[in-house]
Amino acid sequence: MRYDFHTHTNASDGRLSPQALVNYAHECGVTMLAVTDHDTTAGLEEARQVSESLNVQFINGIELSVSWSNTVIHVIGLNIDPESIPLMNGIQTLESLREERAMKIGELLHKHGIDNAYQGAKALAGEATLTRSHFAQYMVEKGYVKDISKVFKHYLVRGKPGYVATQWASLEQAVNWIHSAGGIAVIAHPHRYRIGTAVMDKLLDEFRQLGGQAIEVVCSNMEPKQISRFARLSQRFGLMASTGSDYHGPHQNWNGIGQLADMPESVKPVWTCFE
Ligand code: AMP
Ligand code: MN
Ligand code: MN
Ligand code: MN
């Protein structure tokens, strides 16, 4: 078995259609797959159909944007019912927040000599969740900046001219929406948050108390030391362990899909819930 519980399609900021993503994951040897687009379930139906035709076990997923203690945290819902009303309402709230933020980003970028960024990002996103990645893609395609990571570094992160702070869902809301949809709540890519060990403990403690069930212990680009650290934290806080590449498409300079490190023996893998 090969697992990947964190992937993106062009329903949010991935570059592959759900069909192409599932085909690619299958080629890479993935046998149990979750699609987890940002704040949307729009790609799940297509991905499920293709997965079934390839005998890939498919898990409905989502990656929710959360604001917690001045930090943006991503919480993944696995095995969710996309038709759940509380979840659908939550998604709608996040979509409006994204729309408001995008207009503000467009205005800020305009003041810094970048024209039509809102319209450009919106056109690239189409029906998809409107993300900072679409702004980055627009600015690279228009020749303002050489590559996507430079756009983030110089424009789209805190302290830079195109950054707009947003109050996303609370941790409690996100966990509740996922639970209402029958899903398992998972803290995504814990190694990427710029928080110290005490604050990480506080996050995991609060998450656990709200009923959160799992944490990503294996992610693309994690050092073995980080995997061990999050395996220990998963045990300490009684959280199951998930694994995911956060694949967004061939434009990324790394490709974790089907190439993730083995799950440490010490943890309870989240896939035991799906077998
Ligand atoms: P958003 O949810 O709209 O704020 O956008 C967040 C997305 O931007 C993440 O899911 C990543 O896909 C992408 N992203 C964030 N930081 C970077 C970065 N430094 N380089 C490239 N992509 C990034
Ligand atoms: Mn993304
Ligand atoms: Mn994320
Ligand atoms: Mn992601």
Image: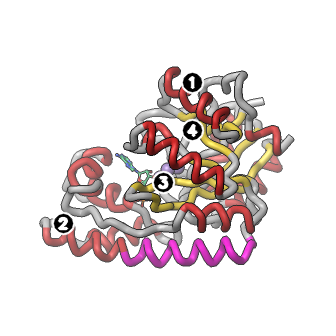
The type of residue carrying mark 1 is Ser
Q: Is residue 213 magenta?
A: no
Q: Earlier in the sequence, mark 1 or mark 2?
A: 2
Question: Which numbered dot is residue 68?
Answer: none
Residues at circles 3 and 2 in contact by the CB criterion of under 8 Å: no
Q: In front here: 13 or 201?
A: 201
The type of residue carrying mark 3 is Ile
Q: Is residue 105 visible?
A: yes
Magenta range: 83-100
Q: Determine the residue positioned at 57% across, 77% down.
A: 92
Question: Which numbered dot is residue 245?
Answer: 4
Q: Determine the residue positioned at 50% across, 27% down.
A: 226
Nearer the observer, disc 3 or disc 4?
A: 3
Nearer the observer, disc 3 or disc 2?
A: 3
The type of residue carrying mark 4 is Ser
**Element under label 2?**
loop
